[in-house]
Image: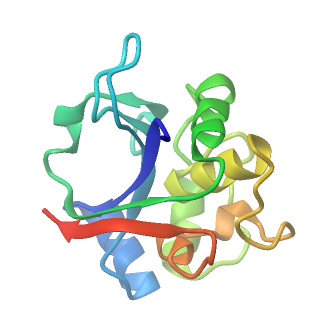
Amino acid sequence: MPRFVLRFSTSPGFISWAIRHRTDFYISHVEFQLLKTDGDFKAGSTLGSRFPDGVQWREPHENANQRGVIFATADGIDEAAMWVNSNRIGCKYDLLGICGIAGGIEDWHTKGERFCSEIVLEGFEEGPKNFLANRYFKTWQFTPRDFFCLPGIRILSGPHN
């Protein structure tokens, strides 16, 4: 049984609104969620990129304002999450990339910084080498909504608050 699931959600705030508005979808965020307590991390802890702190682990209570939660999985999810844990903790949040998505600008991206869907897709490509999307797709143009178009994503439950 996998140790992680993908956790899709939305929350209040301008960044979430801008992503929902631009993608015409009610989900604005995706990250990995730990299913069982493991070492220093509690069950329900999440690993992903959020404004303003970037890529890090977050305690379950830090998800309290998220709504419309959907859980999903894909082949190689544990390896993807652990690759992010080993290689991207501390990366800054790619706010310029989000502005590019919100404004429909093709190539706004700050090298070395990551936003939520970018880090999750990169985790799958680099960890288990599971190219969920076309391997030539630019990860910084990938939104949470785009995961729902991929045949390798399996919805487990949701949406629920």
Residue 30: percent from left, percent from top: 43, 57
Residue 15: percent from left, percent from top: 35, 62
Residue 59 falls in which quadrant of the image? top left
| Residue 48 visible in the picture | no
Residue at image position (20%, 55%) is: 66
Residue at image position (45%, 83%) is: 23
Q: Is residue 96 left or right of residue 62?
A: right
Residue 80 falls in which quadrant of the image? top right
Residue at image position (37%, 83%) is: 25
Residue at image position (32%, 22%) is: 37
Q: Nearer the viewer, residue 126 or 119?
A: 126
Q: Is residue 47 above or below residue 154?
A: above
Question: Considering the image in quadrants, where does the C terminus appear?
Answer: bottom left
| Residue 92 visible in the picture | yes
| Residue sticking out furthest to the right | 136
Residue 16: percent from left, percent from top: 32, 65
Residue 96: percent from left, percent from top: 57, 57
Q: Nearer the viewer, residue 53 or 43?
A: 43
| Residue sticking out furthest to the bottom | 24
User: How is colour applied across the structure in the image?
Assistant: rainbow
